[in-house]
Image (cartoon, helix red, strand yellow):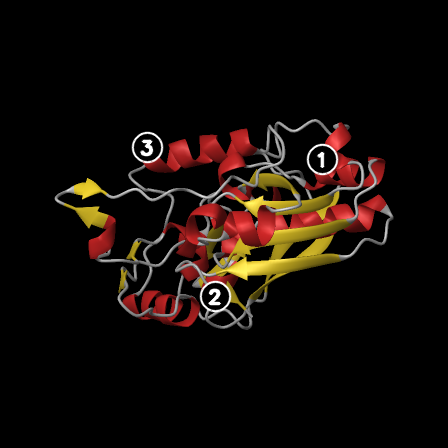
Amino acid sequence: MVRRIIQINEDKCNGCGACASACHEGAIGMVDGKAKLLRDDYCDGLGDCLPTCPTGAIKFVEREAAAYDEEAVKENMKKRAAQGKDGKPEVSETAVGAVASEHVAPQAGAVSQPTGGCPGSRMRMLREQAEKEDVLAGEINFVKAPASQLAQWPCQIKLVPTNAPYFNGAKLLIAADCTAYAYANMHSDFMSGRITLIGCPKLDAVDYSEKLTEIIANNNIASVTVVRMEVPCCGGLEYAAKMALKNSGKFIPWQVVTISTDGKILE
């Protein structure tokens, strides 16, 4: 099958090992001081490794490759664990520092743990303490909540029926799970007047593009808005939406909005 998969330029690789550490599937290994794709079926095509590479040696390509095999990945990780490895090679402090500084910018009032690996999993304290008006005598002071703008149920991409009547003429919002927690005005700014579909390509470990293609191709969708987080694993959601638009054969207005981990819209 032809699918999206990584390609490593060995001439650009400096052997830091950051990409191998970021790859949770164990698809990348260090061989003779260079990063190599060990097996095609270990690569899920989500690209956690791309932004960790300080030299830009990794890119996506579309080529003939074996399908991603989740069971094979699990078996491989079990074997590595049994051998006393955690599936992640040692990474130099220099490489980790480069990854942390280049790809996760320090934020005011934030505490960052520059541990390398997936930026989406890196611990950061965004608020050291709640505002005084939010907490009184150890109890949360609740204010009247605005009305929810969720227009339908279910909203998970994996669960929603592809032929639901609410898709007719709908403005479609495809949002990463974390966006509603990071961006305070998610309901009013993005969900209002739209049909909302949510998902996380990292946790669901599925390719949403086929189902989204079916939804867009078989319904009268007016527009598509993708709201994702800045972390690299969210690239899988954006990619799935773009592939769905392309494969549907329709010309539909679309946009991608990226939310930072501290809740700001990135330009």
Q: Name the residue under label 3.
A: 82
Kind of residue at badge 3? Ala
Q: Which of 139 and 30 is in front in this view?
A: 139
Q: Name the residue under label 1.
A: 211
Picture residue at 65% right of the left edge, 39% below the top: 208
Q: Nearer the viewer, residue 17 or 121?
A: 121
Kind of residue at badge 1? Lys
For residue 235, say whether it is visible. Answer: no
- Which of the 4 image quadrants contains residue 149? top right
Q: Is residue 31 left or right of residue 205?
A: left
Q: Nearer the viewer, residue 166 or 118?
A: 166
Q: Do the residues labelled 3 and 2 touch (CB within 8 Å)?
A: no
x and y percentages locating residue 8 in the rendered image = 58, 62
Q: What element carries label 1?
A: helix
Q: Residue 77 carries which label?
A: none
x and y percentages locating residue 252 in the rendered image = 81, 53
Q: Residue 53 carries which label?
A: 2
Crowd class of label 1 (few under 14; some 14 to 19; many from 20; radius 10 Å) = some
